[in-house]
Amino acid sequence: MTALIETRDLTTHFYTYEGVVKALDRVSLCVDRGITFGLVGESGCGKSVTVRSMMRIIQEPGRIVDGRVLFYGRQRQGEKPVELLSQTEAWMQGLRGDRISMIFQEPNAALNPIMRVGDQVAESFLFHRRRSMAEKILKDLADPDTRVFLGTRRLQHTLYARTASNPDAALLRISRKIPLLKRWESRIKKEAFRRATAIIGRLGIAHPEEVAQNYPHNLSGGMKQRIVIAIALACKPDLLIADEATSNLDVTVQAQILDLLQELKETEITSILMITHDLGVVAESCDRVGVMYAGTLCEEADVSDLFAGPKHPYTVALMDSVPRFHQEGELKTIDGAVPNLVDPPPGCRFHPRCPHVMGVCKTEVPELKAIGTNHKVACHLYGDKGENDV
Ligand code: SF4
Ligand code: MG
């Protein structure tokens, strides 16, 4: 397996009036190409902060304070990955929605209520096409022939000035003045709408041409979520991030959307990073899984290995708290509460709730270590300080 995206020691803090919230503490995980990676854990454990940090969309008062995010994308083997945290914001805008897309939990918040859904799907594709066209023109500006073609100096100046912050707006403005670009714009618009209808059709929606003409309020919850997925897929991304994408849907629609994502992984995109608090969803749709607790990654393994033999005491407790069909007696819960991340417990963040706590757990942070093949765990029980060395 080759890596698609990888985080190394990713650390994110939020600077609030109550103090510094250490929301993410040295999270290192790796999503390989062609797999569905599930990120699980209780609410507030840092799953969303992890993916938002990866995409660099952490908002104030949050800040990524340390670590690296390496994106390999569709590069050939041996080529160097791109370090996302050191790229400019303009470069990241080109990446988001094009190479990495995200589906959010709440389709109503993600869709524009006054825009036809077909246009919304087309818009994502248009944004990136305009952007690469603007970049191409900028490059061509170095060539004297193009300068003649583009005409006045003022025009060039406008393009330069506007491209720095918003290339597609610049292109739209310039295209009104240059017939060649005007024709390009109208051709690309038609292509975008054709593509949008085709994508909507592929998502199992009957009569896509009609649906594309609707506004969000005309559609059901499941349909809206499909449109959100269509927007994310418009540019055929390398990675699709689904943040609790099915949590708000009823179980039958949820099953349909999960099947759809599975199918899309095989036909359209290389990998899916799925955030969920639902272990059932993980068991059904993921190949590999990372378990998070209080801003740390405590275990990472193939789904079959994790379900057959969870190693970290938190993962064990999490699995025991899921109701089973033939279960007798009471459902187990995890004692204690999730710690306050302004002042997290020293050493292992799980130690106040852990039934196997040892002296070392209270002072030393356990490193994420490989145990066996493809299984990693951050716990002193496994390794030279504990007894259960594997
Ligand atoms: Fe429990 Fe110690 Fe392992 Fe933390 S490091 S999970 S406290 S045994
Ligand atoms: Mg979340």
Image: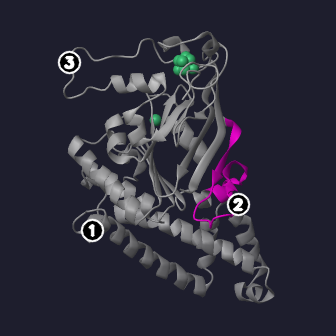
Q: What stretch is highlighted in magenta?
A: 64-92
In the foreground, 305 or 365: 305
Q: Residue at x 35, y 16 (%)?
A: 333
Coordinates of residue 335 in the picture (x, y in percent): 42, 12
Q: Is mark 1 on a helix, strand or loop?
A: helix
Q: Residue 154 appears at what percent x and percent y?
A: 76, 76
The residue under label 1 is 208
| Amino acid type of the residue tagged 3 in the rendering | Glu
Asked if residue 370 is positioned above or below residue 187 in the image, the reply reads above
In reply to whether residue 157 is colored magenta, the answer given is: no
- Circles 1 and 2, Cβ within 8 Å, touching? The answer is no
Kind of residue at badge 2? Lys
- Residue behind mark 3: 328
Between 298 and 254, the one lying in front of the other is 298
- 191 vs 367, left or right, is left
Considering only order in the chain, which callout, 2 or 1, is on the residue closer to the N terminus? 2
The residue singled out by tag 2 in the image is 80
C-alpha separation, residue under disc 1 versus residue under disc 2 = 41 Å
Q: Tell me if residue 220 can be seen.
A: yes
- Kindly identify the residue that appears in the image at 76 percent across and 88 percent down: 148
Residue 133 falls in which quadrant of the image?
Answer: bottom right
Q: Is mark 3 on a helix, strand or loop?
A: loop
Q: Callout 3: 10 Å neighbours few (<14), some, many (20+)? A: few
Few, some or many C-alpha atoms within 10 Å of disc 1 (few <14, some 14-19, many ≥20)?
A: some
Q: Secondary structure under badge 2?
A: loop
Residue 356 pos. (x, y %): 50, 13
